[in-house]
Amino acid sequence: EIVLTQSPGTLSLSPGERATLSCRASQSISSSFLAWYQQKPGQAPRLLIFSASLRATGIPDRFSGSGSGTDFTLTISRLEPEDFAVYYCQQNDASRTFGQGTTVEIK
Amino acid sequence: QVQLQESGPGLVKPSGTLSLTCAVSGDSFTSSNWWSWVRQPPGKGLEWIGEVYHSGLTKYNPSLKSRLSMSVDKSKNQFSLKLSSVTAADTAVYYCARGIIAVAYAFDIWGRGTKVTVSS
């Protein structure tokens, strides 16, 4: 099973700041099958990024994804108040697994 | 507009079977999508449970495989999950989701989730 490890566990930032979230896989995965989701309290997750770097429909361009192999990054260029949430990476290359999540909280 | 809606008992007794259904509107089971179940225990992260293809082909999380059964009912445009021998550790919000080729089989549509508690 491919294990995804996200860091940091919690990111404390202010609106307007840049957020950089990491997702590391226990073995190399195809970037075609790495996705990022946002989840707010009481809501279902929402797809942000698929294929490591492609934004899903309706996702603002302040969200960007990058990476390959075992190291992937989600960047939020300037945090808006609605961006404070939990973010999960997911691999769909070999079966499916999620990372444990990164909480982006208001500083 | 594609929508998914989970339904099923909110309370299941220990050692019993958890049964959920996901009704699909705005899409059909003839398309090349995978239909998944994901769960989230209280205060914890997401866990992929398994998925079913329109043909009935299934893929399961290895850690749950021995207790799982999934199926599709094309006539009702819905798919189902059965998890047997449940314990308190199976208490979670259960989501159904669509994996579509247009987004490399990531989950573009999710249901709102249904809370299931395992307790006597």
Image: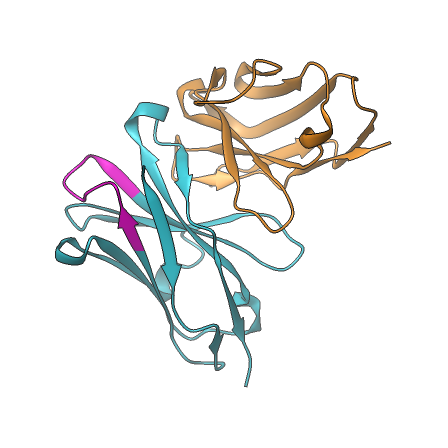
Chain colours: A orange, B cyan
Q: Quadrant of residue B81?
A: bottom left
Q: Position of residue A102 (x, y in %)?
A: 69, 36
Report the number of discs: 0
Q: Position of residue A92 (x, y in %)?
A: 41, 33
Above/below status of B49 relative to A48: below
Q: Is residue B39 visible?
A: yes
Above/below status of B94 relative to B99: below
Single out the residue that lies furthest toward the right: A107
Single out the residue that lies furthest toward the front: B1
* Residue drawn at point x = 20 percent, y = 34 percent: B32
For the C terminus of chain A, which image quadrant? Answer: top right
Q: Is residue B60 visible?
A: no
Q: Position of residue B90 (x, y in %)?
A: 52, 66
Query: Is residue A87 or residue A71 the one in the foreground?
Result: A87
* Residue drawn at point x = 18 percent, y = 36 percent: B31
* Residue drawn at point x = 73 percent, y = 29 percent: A81
Magenta stretch: residue A98 in it? no
Query: Is residue A95 or residue B1 the one in the foreground?
Result: B1
* Residue drawn at point x = 55 percent, y = 47 percent: B46
Q: Position of residue B118 (x, y in %)?
A: 53, 75
Q: Quadrant of residue B117?
A: bottom right
Query: Is residue A5 or residue A84 the one in the foreground?
Result: A84
**Left or right of B5 on screen, residue B78:** left
Magenta stretch: residue B27 in it? yes
**Left or right of B66 on screen, residue A4:** right
What segment carries the magenta color? B23-34
**Left or right of B25 on screen, residue B96:** right
